[in-house]
Image (tube, rainbow, N blue to C red):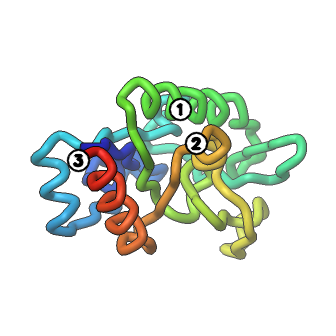
Amino acid sequence: MGKILISACLLGENVRYDAQHRRLSHPVLEQWQREGRLVPFCPEVAGGLPTPRRPAEIRQRFPILVTDRDGADLTPAYLQGAELALEVAQRENCCCALLQSLSPACGRDQTYDGQFRQILVQGSGIAAAELMRHGIAVFDETRLSELFAFMAMQDQSAA
């Protein structure tokens, strides 16, 4: 049965920038956790950022630049966290990832615009993009039904 890399904050770990979590409660996720199929990971913390920390956004995409509200360049930490996310996903044989939406590390389809105005733009977070670039399917908490269908197909294939 396939494993899933999951944002640690979605499992209740206080790793977000504000030292909070975004615990996601769902019976299927709880079952997978009991079965040892969930691999918790926080790219931001793995990349060396503290908890709590100042909010960060992707200021520009090419070349990539991630800054906090004060303009401090956090790009190296985000890139390292993305590389480590990929390493963990590959080492643990994760077939996919369930990541926190809108995050500069984990957002799948959208992130904030880099100006700290609460405006969303199309584009993936740094770790989500790295995982997808290497063929790992990425879902966020708004796409649980798609994740469940994907995992059902993975489990059927493995049977």
Q: Secondary structure beneath disc 1?
A: helix
Going from the N terminus, do you reach mark 3 or mark 2 first? 2
Q: At label 2, which amino acid type do we have?
A: Leu
- In the rendering, at what x and y percent does residue 127 appear? 59, 43
Q: At label 1, which amino acid type do we have?
A: Leu
Q: At label 3, which amino acid type do we have?
A: Ala
Residue at 35% in and 59% down: 153
Q: Quadrant of residue 93?
A: top left
- In the rendering, at what x and y percent does residue 42 appear? 43, 40
Q: Which mark is residue 131?
A: 2
Marks 1/3: CA distance?
26 Å
- In the rendering, at what x and y percent does residue 78 appear? 63, 36
Q: Secondary structure beneath disc 3?
A: loop
Mark 1 against mark 3, which lies toward the viewer? Answer: 3
Q: Quadrant of residue 24?
A: bottom left
Relative to residue 133, is residue 122 depicted above or below?
Answer: below
Q: Are marks 2 and 1 in contact (CB under 8 Å)?
A: yes
Residue that mark 3 sits on = 159
Q: Secondary structure beneath disc 2?
A: helix
Marks 3/2: CA distance?
25 Å
Q: Which mark is residue 86?
A: 1
Residue at 72% in and 36% down: 75
Question: Is 1 left, or right, of 35 in this rendering?
Answer: right
Can see residue 48? no
Marks 2/1: CA distance?
6 Å
Q: Tag 2: Cα neighbours inside 10 Å, few (<14), some, or many (≥20)?
A: many
Q: Tag 1: Cα neighbours inside 10 Å, few (<14), some, or many (≥20)?
A: many
